[in-house]
Amino acid sequence: MTAGTLARGPTAAPGELTDLFCRGLPEQARRFRIAAEMLVEREVEDDFGRPAEATSTFLRYEIEIGYQGPPELQDRERLVLLAEKLDYFTEDEAAGKLRFPHSAGKFRKAAVHND
């Protein structure tokens, strides 16, 4: 709620969360997706601070956010997490996905792992 309200900056007039979506669309269209593709370190730390090793190092994380109007007994609208997905790319797929110049032998073979 706070992030949606502050998205327009501190000097903007307060608005409604529905302003983040296209007006006039049906209720089921009040959603959006965000995705990030990332290379992660092979040696990581788990949630308990213990060393661990990532089984895949080239990942894609996606979320889908939707608008939920206020329920009958409450007067607050909110953004809700509708879907979440974490996937990986294989070494073969990485060649077409990495959109910057790189060497297969010097970079890709060292950075992209799948066990």
Image: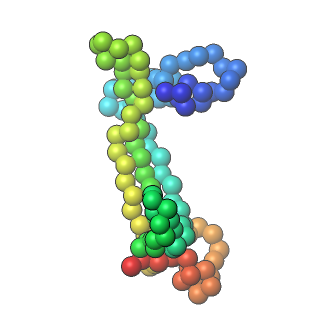
Query: Is residue 98 or residue 85 the one in the foreground?
Result: 85
Please tell me in which quadrant of the rendered image residue 109 appears. Answer: bottom right
Q: Position of residue 9 (x, y in %)?
A: 66, 27
For the image, the number of numbered tags is 0
Image coords of residue 31 (percent x, y): 40, 35
The answer to which quarter of the image holds residue 55 is bottom left
Q: Nearer the viewer, residue 84 or 53?
A: 53
* Residue that protrudes farthest toward the right in the picture: 11
Residue 95 lies left or right of residue 74; in this view the side is right
Residue name at image x 38 percent, y 39 percent: 81
What residue is drawn where x is 43% and y is 51%? 62
Query: Whole-percent x and y of residue 11?
Result: 70, 20
Residue 10 lies left or right of residue 27; in this view the side is: right
Q: From the top left corner, tell me how far across and down residue 108 is, in percent.
A: 56, 79
Q: Residue at x 46, y 73 (%)?
A: 53
Compared to residue 2, the image places residue 34 above or below, namely: below
Q: Please name the residue shown 54% across and 27% down the image.
A: 2
Q: Nearer the viewer, residue 100 or 78?
A: 78
Q: Is residue 70 above or below residue 38?
A: above
Using the rendered image of the protein, determine whether residue 51 is visible from the camera's viewpoint.
yes
| Above or below, 83 relative to 36 | above
